[in-house]
Amino acid sequence: MRMILVGPPGAGKGTQAARLVHSLGIPHISSGDMLRAAVKEGTEMGLQADGFMKAGKLVPDDVVIGMILDRIARPDAAGGFMLDGFPRTIPQAAALSDAMTSAGYALDRVLLIEVPDELIIERGVGRRNDPVTGRIYHVTFDPPPAEIADRLVHRKDDTAAAITERLGYYHAWTAPIVPIYDAQGLLRRVDGVGTPAQVTARITAALGA
């Protein structure tokens, strides 16, 4: 199963990917994690990316796509992969499609996790991180024990204004790729509202459809 995960920031893509890694037996390839790993490993593409980042520039799409092709050629991705965080725009989607076709890869599915903006904002604003254990709580949906409440951290980018800005970017730039994949018959829509287990069950059903 070669698939791309799409959805607004805060929709739960990372949570669902972690659960699907075990059930599908394929790696979760986050573009950000992949980029950092390639730089750390000193791969050819990683060194190129590092040069751009040290110069304060965005890493060009062709370099990112090159790293994606390198990553999905590894043995653990022989049975498929879940790509998350790329593409984010129509030109990136077109360039990735061309590169994968040239390399002999074909997408099987594009999974769209849908969550209303107002719920994403509520999820983000109420999120709290425990710097000791790394666990994430939510003041409403998953309250922390009273004895550790004082040590929890509210991230600066977990404000309504910051989240609204990220959602605006998603709707303006990333959401337009959805109809393209829909027209190709690759898209599967999943309701992302509910418990992680409920959403996973919907995803499993959608991928099998």
Image (tube, rainbow, N blue to C red):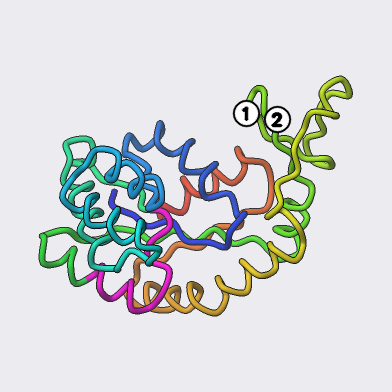
Q: Is residue 127 magenta?
A: no
Three-letter amino acid code at disc 2? Asp
Q: Which mark is residue 134?
A: 1
Q: Which residues are magenta?
A: 84-97
Q: Is residue 90 magenta?
A: yes
Q: Is residue 24 left or right of residue 196?
A: left
Q: Is residue 127 left or right of residue 48?
A: right
Q: Are marks 1 and 2 in contact (CB under 8 Å)?
A: yes
Q: Where does residue 129 sit, x and y in percent of width and height? A: 70, 36
Say which quadrant the C terminus sits in: bottom left
Mark 2, residue position: 130
Residue ranking furthest to the top = 147
Residue ranking furthest to the right = 146
Q: Where does residue 58 sit, x and y in percent of width and height? A: 38, 66
Q: Nearer the viewer, residue 134 or 17?
A: 134
Label 2 SS: loop
- Compared to residue 9, the image places residue 1 above or below, namely above
Residue in the image at 60% along x and 38% along y:
197
Q: Is residue 167 left or right of residue 1?
A: right
- Compared to residue 45, the image places residue 58 above or below, namely below
Residue ranking furthest to the front = 55
Q: Where does residue 89 sit, x and y in percent of width and height? A: 41, 74
Q: Would you say residue 208 is visible in this rendering?
A: no
Q: Would you say residue 113 is visible in this rendering?
A: yes
Three-letter amino acid code at disc 1? Gly
Give the class, few, some or many, for how many residues have Cα within 10 Å of label 1's Cα (few <14, many ≥20): few
